[in-house]
Image (spheres, rainbow, N blue to C red):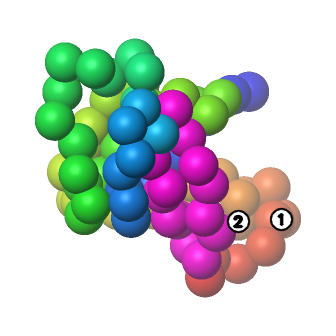
Amino acid sequence: MCLGIPMRVVEVNGYSARCEARGEERTVSLFLMQETAIGPGDYVMVHLGQVLQTMTEREAEEAWELYDQILAAEGGPPSA
C-alpha cells in the first residue's frame, strides 16, 4: 500500500522544498506544482518525493490521525 505523507513546508528553494513531519525532514520536489504558490508554513501531500497537492493544517492532522489508527491496528509504534 502506498500512502501520501502530509508535511509542513519549512523552506522553498526553486522547485525544491524542505518539509517536516513528526520530527523528520525531507527535501521534496515542487516540480508538479509549478502553477501553485507554496511557501513556508504551507501543508502539502508528499508521495515518492513529489508534492502532489496542498492541504490545510486540519486535513494534515486528520490524515495523521488515520495513519495512527492504522498503525495501532497493525500493532505498530505509538504516535509521537
From this view, report whether residue 41 is shown above or below residue 15. Answer: below
Residue extent of the magenta highlight? 17-29
Residue that mark 1 sits on: 75
Which residue lies at the image location 41% right of the left edge and 32% below the top edge?
15
Q: Percent position (x, y) of residue 23?
A: 59, 77
Q: Is residue 77 left or right of residue 31?
A: right
Q: Is residue 45 left or right of residue 38?
A: right
Q: CA distance from mark 1 to mark 2?
A: 5 Å
For mark 2, give the secondary structure: helix
Is residue 4 something one can see in this rendering? Answer: no
From this view, report whether residue 63 is shown above or below residue 3. Answer: below
From this view, report whether residue 18 is shown above or below residue 29. Answer: below
Q: Quadrant of residue 58?
A: bottom left
Q: Residue 65 versus residue 21: which sits nearer the camera?
A: 21
Q: Percent position (x, y) of residue 10?
A: 39, 64
Which residue lies at the image location 47% right of the left edge and 39% below the top edge?
16
The numbered disc on residue 72 is 2
Q: Residue 49 versus residue 66: which sits nearer the camera?
A: 49
For mark 1, give the secondary structure: loop
Q: Are marks 1 and 2 in contact (CB under 8 Å)?
A: yes
Which residue lies at the image location 80% right of the left edge and 55% below the top edge?
74
Give neighbour class at mark 2: few <14, some 14-19, many 20+ (Cα, 10 Å).
Answer: few
The amino acid marked with disc number 2 is Ala
* Residue that lies at the very extreme toward the right in this rendered image: 75
The amino acid marked with disc number 1 is Gly
* Residue that lies at the very extreme toward the bottom in this rendered image: 80
Q: Main secondary structure of the magenta part?
A: strand
Give neighbour class at mark 1: few <14, some 14-19, many 20+ (Cα, 10 Å).
Answer: few
